[in-house]
Image: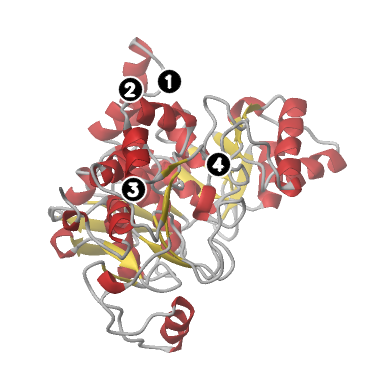
Amino acid sequence: MGRTLFEKIWDSHLVTSSETGPSLLYVDLHLIHEVTSPQAFDGLRIGGRRVRRPDRTLATADHNVPTDPLDVPVADPISKKQLDVLEENCAEAGITLFPRGHANQGIVHVIGPELGVSQPGMIIVCGDSHTSTHGALGALAFGIGTSEVEHVLATQTIPQTKPRTLAVNVVGTTPLGVTAKDIALGVIRRLGTGGGSGYVVEYRGHAISALSMEGRLTLCNMSIEAGARAGLIGVDDVTINYLRTTPGVPQGDEFATAEKSWREFASDPDAVFDDEITIEAASLAPLMTWGTNPSQVVEVTGVVPAPVDEADTRSLEYMDLAPGTPLSQVAVDVVFIGSCTNSRIEDLRAAAAVAAGNTVASSVRALVVPGSHRVKKQAEAEGLDQVFLAAGFEWREPGCSMCLGMNPDQLTPGQRSASTSNRNFEGRQGRGGRTHLVSPAVAAATAIVGCFAIPHEVAR
């Protein structure tokens, strides 16, 4: 019987195996940032241990960095302390670090793929739940806690209980205007926020094969919002062609050798999954969240739904929405285009195509935050920054920004945002803020109209 992609990676990384408890897995790449690593380094010092494989560890500053111009110092003392401590820890351990302003600095889940350090068949971990992003490259990637960060630093291994496998088949062709973000929201609407619990999800089907690597990264990024341990997409031509463009992969004849190995990281035709669901791509449309969890999803052209349980009622109260209200009549205060979900060059191109020749509504503050300095440099070379600035968007420096209330880019109480990020929990973007998750194109259209809108409504 054939094996799934997950089984191939799991089996090839076993250090010790257990049928009744956690197995021990070797870690190929450990990504760290300033928020979840300080306590781990302190734990190493207390225990008299050193970082086992600094050459398989990579650090970047992302969560707490302000997105103001680089000549503006970090004002928040806690953020500055965390950034300083990251630099000190990495210097002491010999770990490569990309600090604020470095040419390779950016959101950890953006720089891993774009630098080519995230590769097929790897096990990749990071003290951040959205590590699932890297699964788009055919890697098994998942978030870990601070105590686990310490364990990986010390041993380059991680104990894990073997999850089950779930195939999510998105079959057929998506309608015009449906993006990877809409597929992700459609999957979460189907599974719910706990439907993926205990599973590693593999995305399959024509609609998935047709996605670019940027789209696949978006989809795998949001696997965690369905409760999954990780998300995976098998290696194909899209994967290989993307890797060719990255600086961290082997070159010349060595690339051909690596490619042969990488192509093995796809599920066999006769592989059997523990569970399987199918979604018809034709049933999807531009989607958005209306509530306070990522499964509360509706069409952008629809209306606020009626509550079906107490949780829905609470969500509507927090979001200050009345059932039956057309979403095209719901005004927004802030539009955020960025985060590890939607801040890559393809995302910015999609938003800029909508913004071109239009103007942000006077009632809206609109921010565009590239996911890395490499993305920012490419966007500026293509003139996308000028498109955004001419339309009235703010063009910011790279960082996690308004994805989470951990840096200066935050909503104020009562403000409503259209956000390309991944979570819409209460207060996620700032205490009392109200977050609606959308695609980059919908975010740009919404910024221009001032209420939720789809791109063709602002086409010029």
Question: Which label sits in the foreground, 1 or 3?
Answer: 1
Q: Which residue is mark 4?
A: 67
Residue located 66% across and 42% down the image: 34
Where 154 falls versus 367 (above or below)? above
List the residue tagged with mark 3: 4
| Sequence-earlier tag: 1 or 3 | 3
- Is residue 40 visible from the viewing direction of this image? yes
Label 3 neighbour load within 10 Å: few <14, some 14-19, many 20+: many
Q: Is residue 113 left or right of residue 104?
A: left
Residue 232, relative to residue 115: is it above or below? below
Label 4 with label 3: CB-CB less than 8 Å = no
- The amino acid type, in three-letter code, at marker 4 is Thr
Q: Can you identify the residue that label 2 sits on?
A: 244
Left or right of residue 44, residue 433 in this image: left
Identify the residue at the far top of this view.
252
**Label 1 sits on what residue type?**
Pro
Q: Are marks 2 and 4 in contact (CB under 8 Å)?
A: no
As helix, strand or loop, the secondary structure at mark 4 comes to: loop
In the image, what residue type sits under mark 3? Thr
Res. 230 mark: none
Quarter-of-image position of residue 295 = bottom left
Residue positioned 54% across, 63% down in the render: 428
Q: Which mark is residue 247?
A: 1
The answer to whether residue 328 is above or below residue 12 is below
Looking at the image, which is closer to me, 2 or 316? 316
